[in-house]
Image (spheres, coloured by chain):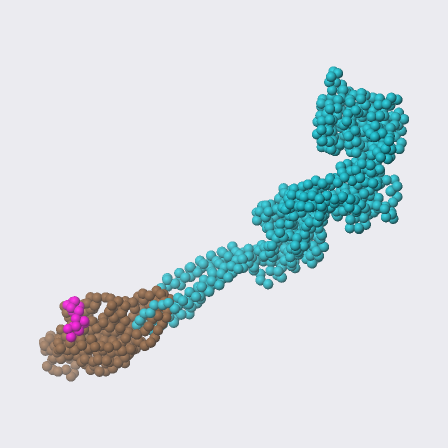
Chain colours: A brown, B cyan
Amino acid sequence: MAETFKKYLDPKTLSRVSALELKARQVVEGIVTGLHKSPYHGISVEFAEHREYVPGDEIKHIDWRVYGRSDRFFVKQYEAETNLRAYIILDTSESMLYGSKGSTKLEYASFLASALAFLLLQQRDSVGFIGFDSKINSYIPPRNSPRHFRLILKELEQASSGPKTNLEEVFHDLAERIKKRGLVIVISDFFYDVEKTLLSLQHFRHKKHEVVVFHVLDRSELTFPFDEMTLFKGFEGNEEILAESWSVKKGYLKAMENFIKRLKTGCMGKRVDYVPLVTDEPLDLKLSKYLAARTGKR
Amino acid sequence: MSLISFSNPSLLYFALLAALPVIIHLLFRRRFKVVRWAAMEFLAASREKTRKLMRLKHLLLLILRCLILVLIAVALSQPLIKTPGLSLFKGRPSVYAVIIMDTSYSMGYKTLNGTVFEDAKKKALEALGLLGQGDSVSLITAGWKAKAVINEPSYQIGTAKREIERLAVSASGNDLAGALQAAAGLLKNSKENIKEVYIYTDCQSLVFKEKEAEIRRNLAGISALARVYLVQAGSGPATENIAVESLAFSREAVDTVLPVRIDCKLSNFGNADATDLVAGLYIDDKAKDSKRLSIRAKKSENVSFFFRFSDSGPHQGYVQISDDPLAIDNRRYFSVNVRDNIRVLVIDGKPSEKPFENAGDYLVSAFSPFGSADGPAKQAIIPDTENLYSFSAQGLGKYDVLILSNAASLNGKSLEQVENFVRKGKGLIVFAGDLAESRFYNEKLFKEKSGLLPAQLNRIETVKSAGDRFFLEGISKDHPVLAGFNEAQIKELKKINFTSHWGLTADAADPSVSVLAYFNDGKPAIAGKRYGRGEVLLFPCGADRLWSDLPVRNMFLPLLYECVYYLCEGSETKRNLKVGDSLSRLLSFSEFSESPRIVAPDKKIMAPRTGVIPEGKELSFDNTGLPGIYELVFGGSETVSDFFAVNPETVESNTEKAGKDYLAGLAPGDKLTIVGEDSDIRQIVGKFRKGIGIWRNVLVLLLCLMAAESILALFYGKREA
């Protein structure tokens, strides 16, 4: 177990990240009072705003002072800080096993997942974990106890990769399963049909979840640093391609660029946070940057 | 038939290297790096897009590389291509070939495979076999005089072949220089694309060196117009040859009284000594004598036969040696007109009643040294004497030589007859003694160099004191009269004492005049002049003892005999000729009405020409191409009236061959190719004839392709990566 901690809880990363508050941009429904604002107005002690009275509103919420000044009925609205229910969804398909320099994408993604879980738990938010490839392989429902973190780490360690990715099926399934609104964090290389991926992400959004996409790629996948005759063996399935690297490079990079662009614009269009990550980049730095940007948005 | 041919076709095998890029490509495809890859979808999409284009690019590069290697092989093979105007049937430009055949007699040298000339003909026919439709040929023989057998370019190659097959070795020498000159003229008029000259010869060293300057000049001329192939005919060294190089009679005027010496020079041109060689003398087709001798390699030996003819009249014969590979020079023919004796008429200008008071007695006794005991029939020279003052010049025709001894002058009629006598080939000896009238001599006999005398009489030179003497010096041994005298005899001649003599002035520049000897005062002592067909000898003193002791000197008789024999030569028809010479003979009065015919050595009967010249009616004949005896027959008679001997030039007998390097250096540049005895003419000619070299063009194309390959490889390859 100690090894598991060491493996996924990079102290450096965690120290940097813990200094920041992970705040959801949207207010989520929660039981545990946290730093996240509750979407349920009126029950909280903290005044939020006035709004014009409409028939049906409770009379007790009418601000009579405002009525005295303006001769119009306004009701008071209150915000209550709730705890966040976050779901970390990790792609464990075989394509995530690729790594050109030391660590694989899966390892990098696992670091990211553990770091995020730790931070959320630190903020007294509930964190759940889902591992998938072509189907959901593991599911840990959201909790906010410290023991829960250990459970997640254990699951991360035991995460086994399946041959194929099926984002579409898994995401639709999860969108239906998760009843309460929360934060959905998807960590994957998204090597799947990008349109289907976006459609399935839309499903989460439809269910009022805030969605953050961490797109993990290897540097080689972005630069294609090959210049000789190469036999490329696929991770998923038995696919093999023998090609002169220099001749396919241009087309490959163009296709990759289009893919990333489409995923990014698709996410933006659906108000999904898109965070590109390359495995040779320091995770702490990238994560801090993202969280800082996210905080700024609030 | 291919339009492209190659000088070095064997190098075309290098074109197989064109497979190298394909092999490398295939090997390269088998050598690859294996990479586990996640983003296969994008890779597959990219590859699908570029696959066709890349395949095309690869194919283009592969073709370029293969082509480069093929072109390298092609360039190395020196491709040749036909030019416009060439015959499509041949796949090369039209050829104009001039064939020069050396027909000199040395080409008749027998080898194990036949004669050298047969080999030359075979090789020439081979060369003609390389000609085809549209090609033309001329044929020149380089015999004693170059002759164009086919002058205008003939497109009938078959006819040319038949002409070559018909050619035979001549008995003459070689006129290669003339043949080359004739070839140059033909080449200049030819418009063909390819011009070739084939010279088939045995490459005799002596022949080439004898006319080297002329051959060099002519070869330079034709090598500027055509490619010249000097084809060495025959096989092996072919130098073993012994020849009867020369044959001469010790005197021209042969009689039945005295034996004549027949001198032969036998030469061994081979590299081996000749031993037990037999030289036989044959006269009138009968063996008369033989000699056995040995001749060392590259040396000569003289053999002499002594023979006395028993019958007067024309005779023919030959000297023959044992057989050897070159037969033609093993026999040397001669023809001689044997007389019963020589008739001399002495015109005594100072007759005397007392014996030996006048020159006539000395002269007559000189010609009859044995007195009259043996009778006139036994004398070689029979003299008659006549008094100048009773001399009528009638009946001069029966004499061979006339001697004017101390004659003061001649009357006009006599003078005219004497002139005619000499003009017809008879001899005249003039002893100008104390009675000679210089005015008559100079005006009538010398006639400003146009008369009988070789010199002008100036004045009588006399010794200044009683003890003084004039004597002979500057004796010319080159002159036939004195050539036969040895040193002792020359010394004896110098001992003759003269007290007086006519001072003569002879024109040394006149080719018809010769001075045989001078006095010690520098004045001519004996002068000669060719006049018409005859000759005159002038002694500026009398034949008596008044001015000299000449008539009592022991050299008087030999000197007189030599003079008479020499002067008789003029009356002799030139019967011994070289191949190609024209023979001529004055006809006697009895022969005028008869029609002459010549029977050649091959027994062909031919008609000679006849014509009138100042000396009389002359018969001439030019067709003396064969060595041997030519018989002159008149009318329907079977009797041979005269013989003519025709012999070949002996320069051809030395069959030593010129070196290949020497021959190659005869023409400037590289247009002269020496084709060795065993070389394949097809291969050599084919190398030069196939067409116009395009290897430079191929190289340019090659460089362009290499540049294109480099650019494409750079463009398609790493830059894309």
Identified at 77% across, 46% down, the residue is: B287
Q: In this view, does B245 lie above or below B703?
A: above
Is residue A15 inside the magenta stretch?
A: yes
Quadrant housing residue B719: bottom left
| Viewer can see residue A36 | no
- Left or right placement of residue A259 versus residue A292 in this view: right
Left or right of B458? Residue A164 is left
Q: Is residue A203 above or below residue B669?
A: below
The residue depicted at 23 percent of the width and 70 percent of the height is A108
Q: In this view, does A254 lie to the left or right of A49?
A: right
Q: Identify the image quadrant of residue A224.
A: bottom left
Residue B297: % across, % down: 64, 44
Q: B57 and A277: which one is in front?
A: B57
Q: Residue at x 82, y 36 (%)?
A: B257
Q: Which residue is outermost to the bottom?
A: A56
Picture quarter with the N terminus of chain B: bottom right
